[in-house]
Image (cartoon, grey):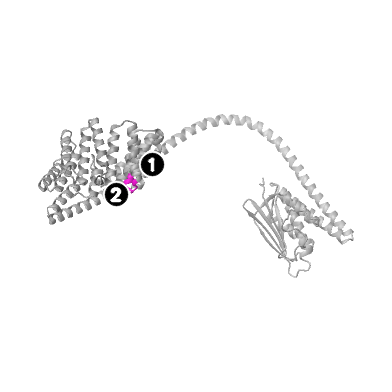
Amino acid sequence: MLSRSVFLLLFGLALPGVAQSVFPLIAEKRQYAEEVEKEARAKGDTLLLAEAYYLYGKMYAFAGDHAASKTSFLKSLRLLEPRGDSYELGRLYIRLSENSQQIAHSQDEILYAYRAKTIFERIHSLKGQVLANATLARVYERLHPNRFKNGLPDSALIYLRKAESFTRQLRDSLGLAVTYMQIGELFLFRNDPRAVPYLEESLRWLNLKPNLRDQLNTTLLLGRAHLNAGRNEKALAKIKEAAKLYKDNHLNDHVLAATLDRAMIAYYEKTNQWRLAYERFGDLYEKETVQFASERDGVLARLQIEYDTEKKENKLKEQAMELSLTTQSLRFQRIIAISSLLLFLITGVSSILFFRLFRKNQRISQQNQYLVQEQKHRAQNNLQVLSSLFNMQARLVTDPGSKRTMEENRLRVQSMALIQRKLDEDTQSDAIDLPLFIPELTTGILNAFGFSQIEVRFTIDPIVLGTDQAVPIGLILNELITNACKYAFPDNPDPVLTIVCRRISEKIGLKIMDNGPGLPDYYPIDTPIRKSKKDSFGMQLIRILVEQVRGSYSFDSSKGTLFNMHFISQSVS
């Protein structure tokens, strides 16, 4: 009895144009699909691109890669479906149904087959309806093989009868032969004696319009049907007839040869000729092994040739491109040479005019530069004078509080003077380099209070600020270091000042920490922006300066005094 797997193989693959060998055909199919895709992309033709994806899907299915096959079919579907019903869309659903069978998606297998049938009915395609009904017959016979035995309609046979009817309307003798062959296969699988007359009828139609491969396949199926019915001699006669067809037509088809071998093996098994069956099976196995190795080597050789050819083609393309670029370059050079002569004349005249303008602008620029330098010197001198006045006033007053206030104001002016001096040193930029500015300012304040020997720890990233931000930061540093000198260092046996300035994404973080006793309890810590009635002038100044740079700050007195501030760095021109 014909096994179910063999039936499905024959039912699905015993069609015209069976591949002569597997690997070479895969390479040919891929090459053709790539050519179609290249043409489609060059023309911008989505319909042709859908056909290319369809060809890729067929190629992957032929190679046994059903996951890749489905991916390609779905790409084709996304391009075809928006265009509405067509024969190509129905054909694509047939392929998706076959693909779902291979990956065991039974529900999709039925769904896709019915969608194809509906599309072919709407566009009145008899050819498509033959294809859809044959596919549904295969699906039902595979999923529900015993349906007809349980009193239910014989769906597989019903759909094949419909396919037969549509084929008759087409008056397609070859199609009718194939349909009778499929009905014969169905009965053969069920061990139904009706297989013989249908297969004989298929051969009769094939004699009217010969098709060698279909004749050979149908003859083998008829031999298997006689074998199932116990007519061993008739079976052997048909198998030999198929073998003669194969030999007389000088076929070199590995698949058909293997099918002949399997038919003979089945005959030997049926007639208990086990030794001959074993020998024939050994021959079949050896031929398939040799064929596989030969085809594999052939594919590798072809791929190597294709690779070498592609390298040569790419090299030729590169040479052609170089030649084209050289020609284009020479043409451009000629154009440039002519243009240069014209430009030279224009430039000669323009140069005289521009030279006069340049001299005039140079004089204006020098004058402006002098005025800017003079303005900077005056600002520097004014700040120095102001600092000296505060210093003189501090020496004259006797009240300690007033003296301290004068000294604090002098240090504030001194920090602004330091910024002005830094700007004077770099005439090309209106910016302050913090790694140089902060240590110098800190040292000046500590020296003013007589704490030049204390340990100062700097951690400063390479940050540059404009004067709009550098001045407030300098004044904040002045206030905090002054407070540290007044309250944290005097009675501290081991005073330490830590200053950290780091860039954190788009923000800059500034930390000033001492190891003194910390702030008094009445200073606000958790809500730094809130104004307290007990704020000193320095604290109020810090709050105003932080708001000026649109930053936020906080104090922490758990271990000494820690000032923590964050603000967004502005771009410096």
Q: Which residues are magenta?
A: 99-106
The first of marks 2 and 1 along the sequence is 1
Q: Is residue 458 above or below residue 109?
A: below
Residue sitting farthest toward the front: 151
Q: Is residue 502 above or below residue 325?
A: below
The residue closer to the viewer here, 179 or 561, is: 179
Magenta stretch holds residue 130: no
Give the residue at x 10% y 47%: 233
Left/right placement of residue 396 relative to residue 559 reads right
Magenta stretch holds residue 100: yes
Three-letter amino acid code at the position of disc 1: Leu
Mark 2, other Cα within 10 Å: few <14 / some 14–19 / many ≥20: few
Q: Which image quadrant: the C terminus?
A: top right
Q: Could you say where residue 544 lies in the image, as x and y percent from the top left? A: 76, 51
Q: Could you say where residue 83 lies in the image, as x and y percent from the top left? A: 40, 33
Quadrant of the rendered image containing residue 539: bottom right
Give the residue at x 76% y 45%: 373
Identify the main secondary structure in magenta.
helix
Read off the residue under disc 2. 300
Q: Could you say where residue 162 lies in the image, as x and y percent from the top left? A: 26, 36
The tag on residue 74 is 1
Q: Secondary structure at mark 2?
A: helix
Q: Are marks 2 and 1 in contact (CB under 8 Å)?
A: no
Rounded to the nearest angstrom, the CA distance separating label 2 from label 1 is 30 Å
Left/right placement of residue 27 relative to residue 537 reads left
The tag on residue 199 is none
Three-letter amino acid code at the position of disc 2: Leu
Quadrant of the rendered image containing residue 13: top left
Q: Could you say where residue 55 lies in the image, as x and y percent from the top left? A: 33, 40
Give the residue at x 27% y 35%: 130
